[in-house]
Amino acid sequence: MANFNAKTFNGEVFGKYVNQIPNLKRNELIHSGALRPRPDLKDMFSEQSGGFYGTVPMFATIGGDALNYDGSTDITANETSTFSQSMVVVGRAKAWVENDFSADLTGADFMDNVAVQVAEYWDEVDQKTILSILKGVFSMTGEGNEEFVENHTLDITGEDSDSAKVDATTLNTAIQKACGDNKDKFSLVFMHSAVATNLENLNLIDRLKYTDENGIQRDLTLGTWCGRTVFIDDSMPVDENGGYTTYILGNGAFEYVDVGASVPYAMDRDEAKNGGRTTLYSRQRKIFAPYGINFTKAAMGTLSPTSAELEAADNWALVVNADGSEAIDHKAIPIARIISRG
């Protein structure tokens, strides 16, 4: 396959190239344990059935006080609640003309070169999607929802200059505020390099180590803060007042599935435009569903939410049971944030 044109292009083969490319950028949210694959959801949201929005059951944990087993006390049963979580498919598409890849077409391995660029592009898009979802989740309003936002946010920007920056106690305080004695659910921290640098200056990030073939122990670039793995990425939000948002997530904080588009990759040759040019088209449909939180589609205009709609407060609410009388315990949701000056 030496030419980049419609006659020689095979969309299925190209898709396999893209899927095999390792990520070379710092889109850390995408490649962490925060995403729990849910391949079982793919059929429900398949392109062929036209599905873009669906609801799946969530089962509550059993509970209730134990009864005295004394031979005379009746044993009574507690009903278990069944919750329902609604989620949406996020569809995105992009196209590039051949000139964008002209430098890649001069070598025999141009498919690999193009695939690297496409894979990195979509990883960056996916991370932006997740950050938009988190922004929407932390904008929720209404009873129960505001309790989640309040308890899962530790904002220290209003403190004096020194106290407004993260320190040795910040993370532990934030996760206890969010989930109480369930704080061990949290395992991953995503922060801007400015926040990480402050922690490094305080010697609060412990570098993970490995032993090389010569038996010498060396530091890895990956570190931990209070036992939680730290990912440093400058795409983490910074507001206009200099407030840095650090996200703390547990493994499986998001349920994820690549639903797929019916034609994910395609080529088109236009002989007339600009004397002739070739365009590469790419499409994707994916689900990123925050655990325990519904996408309500209350403010959604088409069959795929825009970034602005993902950030809209009206489109998110805590999961509730069948009759709406009980919301999921917010302490079961391993998603929290710290807002600091560094």
Image (cartoon, rainbow, N blue to C red):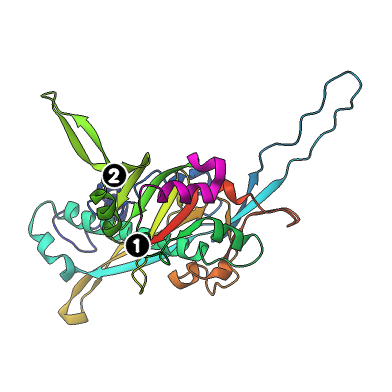
- Dot 2: within a 10 Å radius of its alpha carbon, few (fewer than 14), some, or many (20 or more) residues? many
70 is within the stretch colored magenta? no
Residue at the spot 30% in from the left edge and 45% down from the top edge: 204
- Badge 1 marks a residue whose secondary structure is helix
Q: Is residue 47 visible?
A: no
Q: For residue 49, which quarter of the picture?
A: bottom right
Residue 90 point in image, percent of width and height: 46, 62
Give the residue number, with chain letter if any, for mark 2.
205
Residue at the spot 58% in from the left edge and 48% down from the top edge: 331
User: 140 or 53, which is in the foreground?
Assistant: 140
Residue 309 point in image, percent of width and height: 49, 71
- What is the chief secondary structure element of the magenta stretch? helix
* Circle on res. 125: 1
Name the side, left or right, on which 35 lies relative to 231. Answer: right
Q: Vertical placement of 93 versus 192: above or below?
A: below
- Dot 1: within a 10 Å radius of its alpha carbon, few (fewer than 14), some, or many (20 or more) residues? some
The magenta stretch spans which residues? 166-184
Residue at the spot 7% in from the left edge and 60% down from the top edge: 106
- Measured in 3D between alpha carbons, the distance from the residue under mark 2 to the one under mark 1, in whole angstroms, is 29 Å
Mark 2 or mark 1: which comes first in sequence? Answer: 1
From the viewer's perspective, is the residue at label 2 or at label 1 nearer?
A: 2
Residue 178 point in image, percent of width and height: 53, 51
Q: For residue 104, which quarter of the picture?
A: bottom left
Amino acid tagged 2: Ile
Residue at the spot 60% in from the left edge and 59% down from the top edge: 147
173 is within the stretch colored magenta? yes
User: 218 or 162, which is in the foreground?
Assistant: 162
Name the side, left or right, on which 103 lies relative to 308. Answer: left
Q: Is residue 294 visible?
A: yes
